[in-house]
Amino acid sequence: MSTQEPVDLTLGDFLRACRARVRPEDVGLPGGGRPRRVPGLRREELALLAHVSVDYLVRLEQGRAARVSAEVLQALSEALRLRPDEHEYLLRVARPPRSAPATRPAPQRVRPQTRQLLDSLHEFPALLLGRRMDVLAWNPLGAALLADFDTLPAVRRNLVRLAFTDPTCRALYADWATAARECVAYLRMDAARWPDDPALTELVDELSAKDDDFRRWWRDHRVRARAFGRKRFQHPVAGPMELDFQALGVGDDPDQTLFVYTAEADSPSAEALRFLAAWSAGPHRPARTRLRGDGPAA
């Protein structure tokens, strides 16, 4: 009976996915002119660029290599032209934390100071996101923009789950496919940080079973850090809006992010956001800033 541990192919899957997205001409190699059997770089080409042997690259992609050196990871990152967040993901999957199987992370708690900050953001929609894109807290304008989170059970207060399973949320995004793919990329970054989180595994399994797009995009191994960007909304009350968002760290908790949406000054989107703020303060006002669930979030 073999005592060998199961092979972890996460690093190999990521390397193959990244290799498939790089064209030879993008990295100074001849394209060849003839159609290729597989997209992107061949193993031989990536090995040449990263200054490693083809055999070693094969072992990396098959999960058969021992601990990978920082120098090799840096060379692979440069050869594949990875962004900083992709490089961070590469380091995490190459050196996953050693922890007990299926260990739930510590409960996600919201500090009173964070709730006070959310309450003070009257002009801007804001959400506090935790692991797995869970919505931990929100202000009234954030609820008016995205969803009345107070009416949702705690398990459904998750931006990825809403994007793929809620028709109203799906219709909210003017470009749903782009927004949904970004959600999947954010979730992959969380998976690298918490590979043994059972709740994250359950979420991925659930959405993979329910939605073909999620399943395909999850297998693409695209990753993205929560930082900043722009989203286009088709809001049922305020109409079309193009809003920028920024993701801000919260204190010393690396697993909590404050998402704040803003509109360009004097733009139609800014006017629409002001209208939505007035609407949310009226009879249809969503609940004021709330915690996720009745107690500390898991």
Image (cartoon, helix red, strand yellow):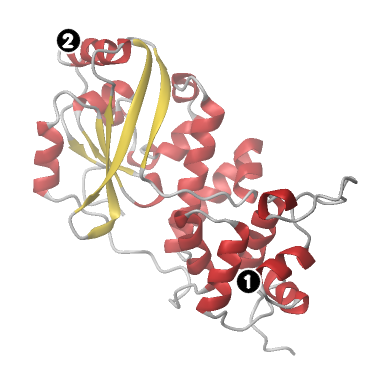
Q: Quadrant of residue 151?
A: top left
From this viewpoint, which residue is outermost toward the right?
Answer: 34
Marks 1 and 2 sit apart, C-alpha to C-alpha, by 54 Å
Position of 295 with respect to 237 (left or right) is left
Camera-side residue: 267 or 273?
267
**Image: 85 above or below 48:** above
Camera-side residue: 87 or 1?
87
Q: Position of residue 162 (x, y in %)?
A: 44, 33
Within 10 Å of the Cα at label 1, are there few (<14), some (14-19), or many (20+) other Cα atoms? few
Instruction: Give SS at disc 1.
Output: loop
Please say if the residues under marks 1 and 2 sit with CB atoms less than 8 Å apart.
no
Residue at horizontal 72 percent and vertical 72 percent from the top:
62
Residue at horizontal 51 percent and vertical 46 percent from the top:
185
Residue 283, label in figure = 2
| Quadrant in which the C terminus appears | bottom left
Q: Is residue 50 visible?
A: yes
In this rendering, the label closer to the viewer, 1 or 2: 1
Camera-side residue: 215 or 84?
84
| Quadrant in which the N terminus appears | bottom right
Of the numbered discs 1 and 2, the one sitting upstream in the chain is 1
Residue at horizontal 66 percent and vertical 43 percent from the top:
216
Q: How many marks?
A: 2
Residue at horizontal 48 percent and vertical 27 percent from the top:
166
The three-letter code of the residue at mark 2 reads: Pro
The three-letter code of the residue at mark 1 reads: Asp
Instruction: Give SS at disc 2.
Output: loop
Residue 8, label in figure = 1
Q: Position of residue 153 (x, y in %)?
A: 34, 36
**Image: 228 above or below 277:** below
Q: Is residue 164 visible?
A: no
Within 10 Å of the Cα at label 2, are there few (<14), some (14-19), or many (20+) other Cα atoms? few
